[in-house]
Image (cartoon, helix red, strand yellow):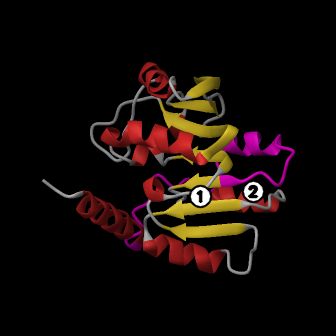
Amino acid sequence: MLKSNEIKKIDADFWDQKYQNQETGWDIGTISEPLKCYIDQLEDKNIRILIPGCGNAYEAKYLIEKGFKNITVIDISETLVLKLKHTFQNIEQINMIHGDFFEHIASYDLVIEQTFFCAIPPSFREQYVSKMHELLSKNGKLVGLLFDKKFESGPPFGGNQKDYQTLFSNNFNFKTFEKCYNSILPRKNSELFIILEKK
């Protein structure tokens, strides 16, 4: 049986190889329209925002363009984070962390979920919910997209609305939990848009 640190090493190596080989089929090349629309209606530019499993950090780029001042991105791939440090060099509004989300310690008003939940094995989902609850400040929100479909293997790992609601119900109030109406065409009718507020 693998020890936890061995699992993390395998995970980090897996994602490093994905970025080194440019095997990033999940990457749509820009911020998704649902998250763009959500960010556009936020008024407080000083809120503390976390983007876990940030990938190429299109959401962070958009947040900076919109004037947000306190953005943190974290990813387990060292290859990716080194690239991001070059991309976002000399931009004070963003803090880039190479590390394990589940070991991260901080406090945020908003966490943006974009293909991170679906990238981790389903056995980690309860831990994901607990960690999100821990990282969010009072009335903090978890906002983003979840796949509403099954995959033969993963990542990505899918699921359905009923299972997700059971998973999150003890820790979050559901402000929005519905079929996404403005997904990109390849993901039409297969995404849920969520706004979950910490209990």
Q: Please report the bounds of the magenta region as a residue range.
A: 20-49
| Residue tagged 1 | 29
Relative height, residue 128 to residue 176 (above, below): below
Q: Indicate yes or no whether the magenta region holds residue 24.
A: yes
> Whole-percent x and y of residue 172?
58, 28
Q: Are marks 1 and 2 in contact (CB under 8 Å)?
A: no
Q: What type of secondary structure mainly makes up the magenta span?
A: loop
Mark seen at residue 63: 2
Secondary element type, mark 2: helix
Name the image quarter holding the C terminus. Answer: top right
**Disc ID at residue 15:** none
Question: Residue at 68% of width from left, 53% of height from top?
Answer: 49
User: Is residue 195 left or right of 44 when viewed as pictured?
Assistant: left
User: Does residue 32 sit above or below 188 in this rendering?
Assistant: below
Magenta region includes residue 155:
no
Three-letter code for the amino acid on which mark 2 is drawn: Leu
Q: Is residue 130 left or right of residue 122?
A: right
Q: Residue at x 49, y 30 (%)?
A: 190
Give the amino acid type for the residue marked by disc 1 in the picture. Answer: Gly
**Residue at image x 41%, y 23%?**
163
Snapshot quadrant of residue 105: bottom right
Say few, some or many: other residues with alpha carbon within 10 Å of mark 1 (under 14 / 14 to 19 / 20 or more): few
Q: Earlier in the sequence, mark 1 or mark 2?
A: 1
Please provide percent x and percent y for residue 88: 67, 74
Q: Residue furthest right?
A: 43
Q: Position of residue 108 (x, y in %)?
A: 66, 50
